[in-house]
Amino acid sequence: MTLPSGAPALDARLFPIRDDLAADWLAGQVDAPRYATARRHTVTAARTPLHPAPDAGRWVSELLYGEAFHVYEAKDGWCWGQAEHDGYVGYIRNQALQEAPMPPDPARTWAVAAPASHVYAEPSEKAPPLMTLSRGAWLTAARDVEEPFLPLADGGYVPRAHLRRPDDYPQRDHVALARDFLGVPYVWGGRSHAGIDCSGLVQIALQAAGRMCPRDTDMIANAFMPVPFAEEEIRSGRGCEYGDLILLPGHVMIALGDGRVLHANAHHMAVTIEPLRHVLARLDERQGRILAIRRPAGA
């Protein structure tokens, strides 16, 4: 794959381009040996890792049940494509996907709004759970019934109290939504209640509050309104408003407005709240450098 002379480099995390293949909508922007048209799929597992390469042990992100993934190539048990919710490109094992060419009917679509929920075998709290879902999972109802448990098209039942409609965001405070993940273990690339990383926490919380958010920290820095700041003022616990995002090299935290931050971090291997000064004190001069403060729209 080559770019036209003088063209800016395209971020391979967000553009489906490889040396041997590219998305058909990139024809004319990149010179590839072949191009492919996407086939829309949805995730059938409670959660599934997104890998940077087939057979890679490391994750770059994670997709949740019902989220859409546009597949450009299926080969040797892997699907290469792009997540619909944030555009991230990578590989998912094909057994975690099913083809779903058309977007679901909005009238039958629901999202998990609780931090976590279960799919039950029967419409009863005494029924055995079949699957554990995390906030942000998307569900298709078999039929809309005014009962405590919603029947799903794929089978099973989910408590209606844990669900919201696609265009309904009952909680707009992304800080409160992120607090729901306190104590959740740290997992690099995670986006679920089973494990989450720093940018995954910010993304899930903002999406649950109705604001789109990209996946990685550098993308987050480019996506939201910059806030002028004096580093010493921030270090002293002032200069940040409730809900601001504090960016360090490779790390993002949510400011609580009182000198403390909420973040998923590898030091505690969990989502925690702690004074910002404690975070900075344990980092070296490079890692502890405040790069930017960002304020999500509507925060």
Image (tube, rainbow, N blue to C red):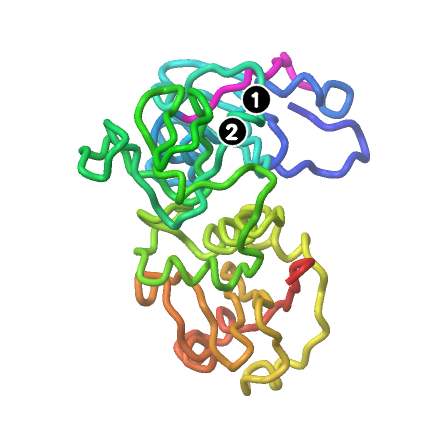
Under mark 1, the amino acid is: Asp
Q: Nearer the viewer, residue 94 or 122?
A: 122
Circle 2: element type: strand
Under mark 2, the amino acid is: Thr
Residue drawn at the location 46% of the way across and 33% of the way down:
138
Which segment did they paint magenta?
A: 31-43
| Apparent side of residue 14 relative to residue 9 in the rendered image (left or right) | left
Q: Which of 68 and 31 is in front in this view?
A: 68
Which circle marks residue 228 in the picture? none
Q: Provide residue 299's location: percent of width, then percent of height.
A: 64, 63
Residue to which mark 1 is pinned: 105
The image shows residue 281, relative to residue 50, as above or below, that is below
Circle 1: element type: loop
The image shows residue 267, relative to residue 218, as above or below, that is below
Q: Which of 116 and 272 is in front in this view?
A: 116
Q: Quadrant of residue 229?
A: bottom right
Asked whether the residues under the numbered discs 1 and 2 touch, taking CB atoms below 8 Å apart as contact, a structural biologist would say: yes
The image shows residue 271, relative to residue 116, as above or below, that is below
Which circle marks residue 109 in the picture? 2
Q: Provide residue 150's location: percent of width, then percent of height.
A: 38, 31
Residue drawn at the location 30% of the way across and 26% of the way down:
156
Residue 207 is covered by the magenta coloring: no
